[in-house]
Amino acid sequence: MVEHHAIQTMQDLRIERNQMQYTNAMTNPTNIVLRIFGAVALIWAMPLTQQAQDTGSILTVGTESVSAADFQHVFLKNNRDSLITTASLDEYMELFINFKLKVQAAEAMGMDTVETFQRELAGYRTQLARPYLTNNELLQDLVKQAWERQQEEVRARHILVNCSAEASAADTLKAFKRAKAMRSRIANGEDFEAVAKSKGGSDDPSVRDNGGDLGWFSAFQMIYSFEEAAYTTPVGELSDIVRTRYGYHVLEVTGRRDARGEIRTAHIMIRTKDGASDEEMTQAENRIGQVYDLLQNGLPWGELANKMSEDATTSGKGGELPWFGTGKMVESFENAAFALKSDEAISKPFQTTYGWHIVKRLEYRAPLAFESSKRELQKRVSRDSRSELTRQSFLENLKVEYDYSASSSALGTVKRYAARQDSVFYPNHPLAVTRSSDKSKKLVTLAGETFTVQDFTDHLNKTKLRNVDKAPNELIDNQFQAWTEKLMLDYEDTQLEGKHNDFRLLMEEYHDGILLFELTDEKVWSRAVKDTAGLEAFHADHRNDFMWGRRTAVTIFTCANAKVVKSVKKAIKKGKDLMAFQQQMNMEESNALLMESGLFSEGENTWADRILNDDGAKVIEGTSGATSAIETFEGAGGETILVHVTEIREPQPKTLMEARGQVIAAYQDYLEAAWIAELRNNANVEVNTDLLHNLAD
C-alpha cells in the first residue's frame, strides 16, 4: 500500500493492492502516468507539514535510514483529517516498511539503472522542477496585480511605429526617434488624432478609422508592457515610449471605469450593408421597430429570432451569443447589453456598424473575487509575456547567490575572431578560435566553476543560429545571454533537492513509485494473470472461498390481464416454445406479455428474491418433487407477475471461469503476502518506537 501511495504520489496510503489489480492497472499502463500527474497539482497546493521536532532516525531498513521528519511528512500527507494515535502510527509503519523493502528489492535488481526508467524519471523531474526555477514571490505579486487590474477597465489611444524584434540596431534607433518626435509634437500641444493620421504618423492601419482609439480593455487583453503603460499613466496624460514586439508606441489614456464583468445575451438583428442608401437604412430601422412592437405585444422571443433575425449564425438558437466582456463586441453593442439591469430584460432597438439590433440579457456575472480566480490567473500569468519578469528576476537572484561574473574582455576576444571570418555562423562556417591562450581565457565564473572562451565557442558552433545575416556581434551577445542563463538554470536545477526539502521528497516519491510499479507488475500483477497453472492450483486449493449463494432459475412473465395469465400457465404446462408464444400474444395485443429468464442470485432480481426468501420457501416445498413451480404476484401497476421456477440451487463453488476476476485478485494478494514475507525474512529492520509514538496527538 505504501508502494501504491508512492505510485500515486503518496496520495492514499490506506489503499494498497486492491486498487492496483491487473484489471485496473495492467490493462491500461498509462493509468499510472495519469495518476502521478493528477496528484502533482494537489502536492503543490499542500501546505508544508509541521516538521518532527526530533529529526533522528525513526526507521532503518537494511542500510537505509528514514528520518522522523521524512516519515512524518509522508504520514501527515495521508492522514490530514485523522486523529494521530499510536495504533495508527504502528499500522502505517508496517505498511511503510513493506514499501521500503520492495523499493530496495527493485534497486538491488538494478531497475533504477535501466535507461527507460531514468528517461521517464528525468521527464517527470523536468516538469516538477519548473515551479522552483522562477521567482514565485514575484509570480504571486503579478497574479494579485492582474486580479486588481481586472477590477478596472482602461481606455486609451496609441500611435505605433513598426519595428520588429529582429530589426537591426540602426533601424531600431530610427524607429525610436520617430516615435519620440511624435510624442513631443503631442506634448507640445498638437492634437493626438491629427498627429496619428498625419503623413509619417502611426503605422497602425486602423488609425484611418479610429484615430488610434483602442476602446476599453483590461488585464491580459494587451501585451503586458502595453498594459503596464496604460494602467500606470494618469487619465489625460501621455505614457513614456513603450516597446513591444510590434514596435514603439505612444499612449494617451482617455478613461478609466469599474470593470463590467461578463454577460450572456441573445439578439435579433436586421442587417445593413456598407454603402446602403438612405431608403434602405430607413427600411431596416422600420423592420427592427416592427420586431420590437411584436415583442412588446407578447410574441415569444425565440419565435421572432428564428423568423426575423438576419444573423444566420444565431437565429436558429434564439439569437443566443456566447459569454462576453469588454472588448469582445463593438462598443455600441456592449453598451446596450450592459445597460440592461436584469435577466430577461430587452433593449430598445439600437444601431451598430453591422445593422440594427435588439438585445436580451440572459445571464450576468460580476468580476470574480481573488480567491475564486487565483488558480486560473496563475495559469494565465505563467503563459503570458509577464512571466518573463519572474524568470529574469530569478536569474538576477542566482547571479548574486552563485557569485556570477563575466569577462567583457574575453567576450571581446570571441567577437574579434568572428570579425575576421567571412560568412561566420553560416552553414559550414563555424567560429574558429585558434590560439590556445585565447581558448582558455576565463569567460564566466559561476559557483566557483570556470567556463572558458572555448566552452562558449563550442556552444555557438553546436547551436543552429537564426538570423545569421545579422551583425556577428549582435548574434554573439544574444547567444551569450542565452548560454549564461542556461548555465545558471542548469546549476540551480542540480541544487533543488538540497535547497527544497519538499522537492526532494517529491522526487523520492516519483522515483520509488515508478520502480514499485514495474517490480510489482513483475512479481504480482502480471504474474497472477500469466501463471495459468499457479492460478488453477490456487483456485483448486481455495474453491470454498469463491462460492455462489443460493440461486434460482426462473422465467418471469409480466401479464397485462387475467386472460394472459391463464394463457401463460397453459403454455408452460404444455411445454410450448415460450419465445414464439410471447410473440404471438403481443401480435394479438400490444405489450400483453413481457418475459425475462435467468439464473439469479439474491439481490439481482426482485421477483427471484421473492422466491429465495421465506415466502418463496412455500413454493419450493409445494413442488413435492415436481421439476417446476409457478407463483403469482401483483405488480406495482396492476399487472400480474407470474414466476415460473425451474430450479433452486444451493450454495456451490464457482468455477475458475466464473470467478476469474476474484481469483486473480486473491492470487495477487497471496503472491504479494508471500513476497513481503520473503523480503522481511531477509532484511534487518529496526523501528525507533519511542520516536514514532512521539508523533501521536
Image (tube, rainbow, N blue to C red):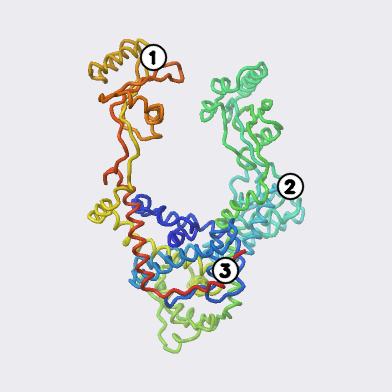
Distance of label 2 from label 1 (alpha carbons): 74 Å
- Residue at 25% across, 25% down: 627
Which residue type carries mark 3? His
Q: Position of residue 209 (x, y in %)?
A: 63, 41
Q: In the image, is 440 to the left or to the right of 577?
A: right
Front-most of residues 489 and 76: 76
Q: Which residue is mark 1?
A: 560
Mark 1 falls on what kind of element?
Answer: loop
Distance of label 3 from label 2 (alpha carbons): 61 Å
> Does 124 sit above or below residue 656?
below
Residue 54 location, quadrant: bottom right
Quarter occupied by the N terminus: bottom left
Which residue type carries mark 2? Arg
- Residue at 47% across, 73% down: 472
Q: Which residue is mark 2?
A: 256
Distance of label 1 from label 3 (alpha carbons): 69 Å
- Residue at 40% across, 28% down: 610
Quarter occupied by the C terminus: bottom right
> Does 97 sit above or below residue 586?
below
Q: Which residue is mark 3?
A: 693
Q: Is residue 96 visible?
A: yes
Mark 2 falls on what kind of element?
Answer: strand
Which is more foreground, mark 3 or mark 2?
A: 3
Mark 3 falls on what kind of element?
Answer: helix
Which residue type carries mark 1? Ala
